[in-house]
Amino acid sequence: MSDKKDITLSINGRDHKVSVDPRWTLADVIRDHCGQTGTHLGCEHGICGACTILVDDTPVRSCLMFGVQADGKKIRTVEGLANGNEYHPLQKAFMENHALQCGYCTPGFLMLATGILEAQPDISDDDLNDVLSSNLCRCTGYANIIKAVRAARDEMKAAS
Amino acid sequence: MATATNRMLGHLGDSVERLEDPPLITGKGRFVGDINFADQLHMRIVRSDHAHGKIISVDTSAAEAVPGVVAVWTNENIDDIPPIDFREGSDSTLALFRQYPLARELVRYVGDPVVAVFAEDPYTAEDAAELVIIEIEPLPVLINADDPPQDFKGQATTEAAIVEQGYGDIDETFANAYKVVEIDVKVSRHTGVPMECRGAIGRYDEARDVLEMYGAAKVPHRNRDTLCRMLNRPASGVHLFEGHTGGGFGIRGELYPEDVLVCVAAMRLRRPVKWIEDRREHLMAANHSRQQRHIIRAAVAEDGEVVGLDDELYLDQGGYIRTHGTRVANMTTGTLPGPYRFPVYRSICHFRLTNKTPAATYRSPGRCESTFVRERLMDAVAVAMDMDPIAVRRRNLISLEEMPYGRALDVLGDSVEHDPGDYAGLLDQGLAQIGWDDLQKELAERRANGEMVGAGISMFFEKSGLGPSDGAKIFVDNEGFIEVVTGGASIGQGFETAMAQIAAEDLGTDYRRIRVVHGQTNRIDYGVGAHASRATVLTGTAVSLTAQAVRAKALDMAAELLQTTADALTITDGVVHAKDNPSGPSLTLGEIAEALIPTSKLRGDREPYLKGEEWFHIDHQTYPYGHHIAVVKVDPDTGGVEIEKYFIAYDIGRSINPKMIDGQLVGGLAQGVGGALFEEFTYSDAGDPQAVTFADYLMPTLKEIPIPEILLTEDFPSIRTPLGIKGAGEAGITGAAGAIASAIDNAIGIPGAVTETPISPQRLKKILSEHDK
């Protein structure tokens, strides 16, 4: 359809040199051309948040951004959340609090929460609810997601 | 060396962490979209944009000319493929109404697949699909199931079936009633909407003559059987594989047109074919559910006893009858009486096709709808009799003394027989826990101060553990690792963890040493998947019986090797030892397995291997029960409803993993709140769907969902299963709409105001303005 453009995506610290159609979404490039399928697509119109990743440390819906727009930017996805074999406090909290069932929305919630807790380590419960209400989950009824993110916030604060 | 005092992780009743979680929190899940095969093609479906019409012509030439397009199919390319058959086998009375994988002659809803485009990549397939020109001659559109039926293909009408159930003399009962109370209520069209859209990959292995489908879910074995029937292939030559599944809720995993298409295309195009649905497609093509209108009346005696129930309902089936046949109609008419006695009963379901997306089951099918209707009626009876709504319910509940309570009703081939349970007792516990009397006073005071606040209740009985049978296999290898192979399915509910916990209980091992296989039709011949809250009840019991058999075999072998008797031995943390001497001579399960290999001299005449396969047969489904209580606040300016408090009481019989049960109840409630307040597929008069994005189909976020208080009791283990297990999958949703509607009536002070879900701000504002509030 159109001329390809060579870009470099830095995903979880590793550079991926890819030749992309300008119209390919960032989510598709990450999934289909960089092999990182942990980022999930739930609606492809920016509402459900399943595809949330961090671009330059800010939560972004990767279905609403083109791959070419992310050229040279620092991308973090769920695959990069753990430190080697050591889970991120959010990952641990999600397991301990049964904050996932099918796990499809989970990467989006994890990256959304990572972004917000890094930016605002002292975020209040109410503000956290505001942020987390931007993503959809169809299994858990959210109660355990709230619990898990609050637990991770408290643990990350205590550790810092 | 483990000792008997060591607590092994993951036994029955432990809220252990899930085995499923590690890949899912690290991005290593294998959902169907994550699976790829070399040389695969991508399929894109061109769907009808007419709700009803005759296909005059289809021009695929422009699409075929797009570089990268390999094939473009209409029904003519696959006119040897029959319509998609019913899951439970062929049914000649309904056969006419089945859907072809690609529309033949007619289109019957917006979203009906007409053309399939196969291309080298998904973007190309989608581009080419836009170039297909379909000429349709419009036919009259039927939107409402309660409008007069229309012609169907010149051979029938759109009233595909009438499903009637009941017992006793309705006419006499109503003629002699002290009072007759009638309501007319509707449940909207909404559905499961899992976060993962559907997907399927067909792959044909010519070398072995095996057709494979990836992306199966819910009922892989059943779908294999249907595919074999449709494609005339042996079961040994069709394998379905379930990977991770992003939510099920009844709608995901049924056999859809797209599933058949990728299989047929893989065989004919000789390349793997992948199809991933987008959300717009999902909302117009995956099964819808729920839409019913009930005109229902109660014959009431002077003391509030409902002596007769007479229901006539219109079920909106949509464009075709899919894999479920009339099961939703059956479950609705079979469970409508709920936890009440109702000595005389009749329900007549007009099962009618319309020109909308085909409908089928969504979590708690039939019970969700009928519970809303029945509980609305019980509230109406209370008003008509000037009785307290709790008192009316109490007057009619089936008592513990009457259990097990049979009725001349059929639910999925099972004659209903309520498990013993104390419905009134659980009601007492629930009301006490929530402080019902004080709550009423508090709400009355707040109403007196001008607030629109109220409380409502909804009681229900659930059904779970659909039989009749299920089996399981267990194999212990020489290192003591255990594999449990089932025909169950994992749709996010924690199936692997539950099965591992059940097996661990009898095998005396840490549940984390157990690998659970599900949804792989090449690993076990038989399976009925995950639906109808049956997996833990049926498959779990089969796993338990198999684990017991393997345990017995292990102890028998060990007894000989340790020169003692089997009943003197036990297993702790994978080690067999004397019950009274945990630190004495011992053997690991792996060592016992090694003693049982075919060439082992120690084996004697025992069957080779430390393995087992057992079956569980159930004579009736299990019928758990409970109630929901909602406290809501209505904003008269916006018509918005805030759920201030929510309470669920439920008797589970026996918990395997309480945290997962809690998760099922809370998650079910979220969907219940969605259906009660927000979610609805609306259509224009021309049959255009108006909710095909998440901006129009409103699913609740965490802002709309209350965190419920839950009273989970184990007071009445099921008499149908040796472990006493009853299902947990659907109780969170079943009572929601009824309780919320009742609370809204109470809050706005207009009895019987809510007659239709979702109780959207628009509907509520209309009710308020009609009553000058």
Image (cartoon, rainbow, N blue to C red):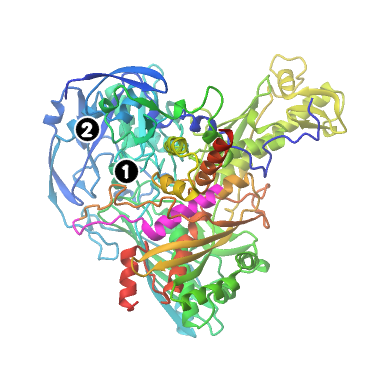
For this view, does B223 lie left or right of residue B55? right
Give the residue type that dot 1 points to. His
For this view, does B144 lie left or right of residue A115? left
Q: Where is residue B720 in the image (x, y as percent from the top left)?
A: 64, 52
Image point 23% across, 48% down: which residue? Answer: B110
Quadrant into which the N terminus of chain A falls: top left
Q: Are the residues tagged 2 and 1 within 8 Å (C-beta)? A: no
Q: Earlier in the sequence, mark 2 or mark 1?
A: 2
Q: Where is residue B204 in the image (x, y as percent from the top left)?
A: 36, 23
Q: Do labels 2 and 1 share a chain?
A: yes
Give the residue type that dot 2 points to. Glu
The residue wearing badge 2 is: B126
Give the vertical position of B391 relative to B247 (above or below): below
Query: Magenta: predominant secondary structure element?
Result: helix
Judge by depth and name the residue closer to the eye, B2 or B345: B2
Image point 17% across, 57% down: which residue? Answer: B140
The residue wearing badge 1 is: B282
Quadrant into which the C terminus of chain A falls: top right
Give the vertical position of B392 relative to B583 (above or below): below
Q: Determine the image quadrant of residue B420.
A: bottom right
Neighbours of disc 1 within 10 Å: few (<14), some (14-19), many (20+) = many
- B667 inside magenta stretch: yes
Image point 35% across, 26% down: which residue? Answer: A31
Part of the protein shown in magenta: B663-686
Q: Determine the image quadrant of residue B656.
A: top right
Q: Can residue B179 be seen in this view?
A: yes
The chain holding disc 1 is B
The chain holding disc 2 is B
Q: Where is residue B139 in the image (x, y as percent from the top left)?
A: 15, 54
Q: Determine the image quadrant of residue B508.
A: top right
Identify the secondary structure beneath mark 2: helix
